[in-house]
């Protein structure tokens, strides 16, 4: 799949994905299907292994098995590591689903700390390689204070930035990710946590 320049509409369907708190070996992952940053259309879920190697495959299945598949124009991730250090291969996820993928971060990662932590897990070089493969993070100014940082695959930078900004309707984090976070934490903790 090449790089897409999307014709952007305010109601573009976005699947925002976030994981739940790390309370067990099996980590709940929730996807919120939204039209832009305003309208929740559906919720999907899967699970991954804490610090495992199955995030890319499980997210791919979650996207392609959704009844919304084919209507989803962008997949958004709350970072490329889920369930601890279960790293998502953004490029593979984009290619297999045929959908652009955008990762959102509140701050730039400390790569030295990440590399050190990965040495405690299986296949540290492979995991670190996937993190590097995600590409350079681009700073996106927000209307609510500090910027966010994005990485993207299967889409051009200008489109990725525009989608992130237009879907950040209630905070500096895009609404599809914020909603996925609220649902995932609410299910696992019994009450949702505001901090994404």
Image (cartoon, rainbow, N blue to C red):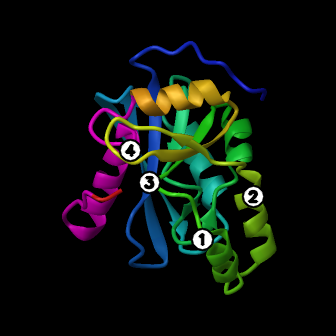
The local crowd at label 1, few if under 14, some if 14 to 19, many if 20 or more residues have their Cα within 10 Å, is many
**Marks 3 and 1, the one that precedes in the sequence:** 3
Which of labels 3 and 2 is toward the front? 2
Q: Position of residue 165 (x, y in %)?
A: 43, 31
* Residue behind mark 3: 18
* Residue behind mark 1: 85
**Marks 1 and 4, the one that precedes in the sequence:** 1
Q: Is residue 165 above or below residue 55?
A: above
**Marks 3 and 2, the one that precedes in the sequence:** 3
Name the residue rendered at 70%, 76% in the picture: 115
Q: Position of residue 10 (x, y in %)?
A: 40, 17
Q: How many marks?
A: 4
Quarter of the image that includes the N terminus: top right
Residue 177 covered by magenta stretch: yes
The local crowd at label 3, few if under 14, some if 14 to 19, many if 20 or more residues have their Cα within 10 Å, is many
Give the image quarter of residue 193.
Answer: bottom left
Give the image quarter of residue 192.
Answer: bottom left
Q: Secondary structure at mark 2?
A: helix
Magenta segment: 167-194
Q: Is residue 98 visible?
A: yes
Quarter of the image that includes the C terminus: bottom left
Q: Position of residue 73 (x, y in %)?
A: 54, 26
Asked whether the residues under the numbered discs 3 and 1 touch, taking CB atoms below 8 Å apart as contact, a structural biologist would say no
Task: Give the side of residue 116 with respect to residue 174, left or right.
Answer: right
**Marks 2 and 1, the one that precedes in the sequence:** 1
Which of labels 2 and 1 is toward the front? 2
Tag on residue 132?
2
The local crowd at label 2, few if under 14, some if 14 to 19, many if 20 or more residues have their Cα within 10 Å, is few
Q: Secondary structure at mark 4?
A: loop
Q: Position of residue 171 (x, y in %)?
A: 30, 42
């Amino acid at each position: 799949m090449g790089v897409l320049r999307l014709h952007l509409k305010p109601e573009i369907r976005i699947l925002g994905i976030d994981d739940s708190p790390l309370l067990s070996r099996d980590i709940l992952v929730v996807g919120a299907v939204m039209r832009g940053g305003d309208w929740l259309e559906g919720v999907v879920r899967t699970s991954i292994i804490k610090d495992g190697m199955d995030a890319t495959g499980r997210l791919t299945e979650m996207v392609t098995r959704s009844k919304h598949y084919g209507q989803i124009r962008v997949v958004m991730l709350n970072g490329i590591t889920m369930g601890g250090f279960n790293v998502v291969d953004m490029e593979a996820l984009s290619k297999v689903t045929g959908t652009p993928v955008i990762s959102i971060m509140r701050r730039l990662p400390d790569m030295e700390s990440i590399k050190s932590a990965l040495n405690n897990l299986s296949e540290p070089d492979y995991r670190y390689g996937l993190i590097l493969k995600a590409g350079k993070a681009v700073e996106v100014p927000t209307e609510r204070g500090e910027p966010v940082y994005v990485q993207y695959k299967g889409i051009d930078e200008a489109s990725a930035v525009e989608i992130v900004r237009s879907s950040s309707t209630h905070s500096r984090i895009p609404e599809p990710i914020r909603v996925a976070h609220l649902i995932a934490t609410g299910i696992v903790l019994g009450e949702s946590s505001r901090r994404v």
